[in-house]
């Protein structure tokens, strides 16, 4: 079966600084891929480039048989890729429901609508008219995830879902991912919280200094291999 996402030789950066140095990765349909790595490894840059929020400099991105590398963000979204950005980036003056509806601005046909998001995160349904900023950090993360799902993506890119959240809340959010996958959505999670990422993913990629330094199935990788890839040779 051909991959849903195939990335080859991807480079990207900021001004004179090259942040990604030839990233290769692929994701089969229906799977969860975890991208781990320390601060500054390039994980967010990679997700932002895949989502079209940052221009790629060279390399190719094929998604569902189509070249999407270099397309602007709204076209990448229309093709079926949605980003849950680091820090959530909710619209502070809007209610929970209005934030969710913003995610449907570019929308493909599919199962995700307000009712489906409220079924996934029932607590949000109680707060639908509240300003999103009045919610706890974990609830806001649920809104950010729900907003991305409202576009009916085939691929969901999640940047640091666990950042700043209590472990019990992180667990609740991660528990939703298998339900999301069961609806035909493939997922890439970027995480510094390695145990969460490895628990949910079928494949893991470790990045360091803008390169993929380790890739494989979590069960096939030793703690030593992961630690060395994460922190570098000691
Ligand atoms: P973190 O977990 O801290 O978000 P990361 O692995 O996601 O780390 P990136 O945020 O992608 O890493 O950063 C990769 C490199 O690009 C770092 O050296 C960072 O300083 C640099 N960088 C990120 N954003 C910018 C920017 N807007 N302008 C200039 N350099 C940037």
Image (cartoon, grey):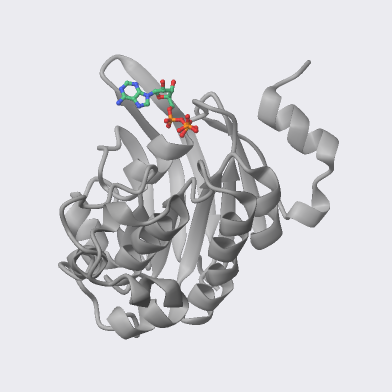
Can you tell which quarter of the image residue 31 is in?
bottom right
User: Which quadrant of the view contains residue 214?
Assistant: top right
Q: Compared with residue 230, is residue 72 higher up or lower down, i.e. above or below? A: below
Where is residue 174 drawn, in percent x and y? Answer: 58, 62
* Residue drawn 59% across the image and 29% down it: 38
> What residue is drawn where x is 62% and y is 60%?
171
Front residue of 21 and 234: 234
Q: Residue shown at 15%/53% (left/top)?
A: 93
- 219 relative to 144 in the view: left or right: right
Q: Residue at x 40, y 45 (%)?
A: 47
- Residue 127 screen position, x and y as percent: 32, 70
In this rendered view, identify the residue nearer to me: 77 or 89: 89
Q: Would residue 105 be seen by someone viewing this image from the given angle?
A: yes
> Which quadrant is home to the C terminus?
top right
When asked about the image quadrant of residue 125, the answer is bottom left
**Residue 113 in view of the camera:** no
The answer to whether 147 appears left or right of 4 in the picture is: left
**Where in the image, quadrant-wise, is ligand 1 located?**
top left
Rendered view: 114 above or below 209: below
The answer to whether residue 12 is above or below residue 124 is above
State the image coordinates of residue 185 (x, y, percent, origin top left). 45, 72
Q: So how many labels did they put on this image?
A: 0
Which corner quadrant holds the N terminus?
A: bottom right
Q: Nearer the viewer, residue 204 or 140?
A: 140
Q: Position of residue 99 (x, y in %)?
A: 22, 63
């Amino acid at each position: 079966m051909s991959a849903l996402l195939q990335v080859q030789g991807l480079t990207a950066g900021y001004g004179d600084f090259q942040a990604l140095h030839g990233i290769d990765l692929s994701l089969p349909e229906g799977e969860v891929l975890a991208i781990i790595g320390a601060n500054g490894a390039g994980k967010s840059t990679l997700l932002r480039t895949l989502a079209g929020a940052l221009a790629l400099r060279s390399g190719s991105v094929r998604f569902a048989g189509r070249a999407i590398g270099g397309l602007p963000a709204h076209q990448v979204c229309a093709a079926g890729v949605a980003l849950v950005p680091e820090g959530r980036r909710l619209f502070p003056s809007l209610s929970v429901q209005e934030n969710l509806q913003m995610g449907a601005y570019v929308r493909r046909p599919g199962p995700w609508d307000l009712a489906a998001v409220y079924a996934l995160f029932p607590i949000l349904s109680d707060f639908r008219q509240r300003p999103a900023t009045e919610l706890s950090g974990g609830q806001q993360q649920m809104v950010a995830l729900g907003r991305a799902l409202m576009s009916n993506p085939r691929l969901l890119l999640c940047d640091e879902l666990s950042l700043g959240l209590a472990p019990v809340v992180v667990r609740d959010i991660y528990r939703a991912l298998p339900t999301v996958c069961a609806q035909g959505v493939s997922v890439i999670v970027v995480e510094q919280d390695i145990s969460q990422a490895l628990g949910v993913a079928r494949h893991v990629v470790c990045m360091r200094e803008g390169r993929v330094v380790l890739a494989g199935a979590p069960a096939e990788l030793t703690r030593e291999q992961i630690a060395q890839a994460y922190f570098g040779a000691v």
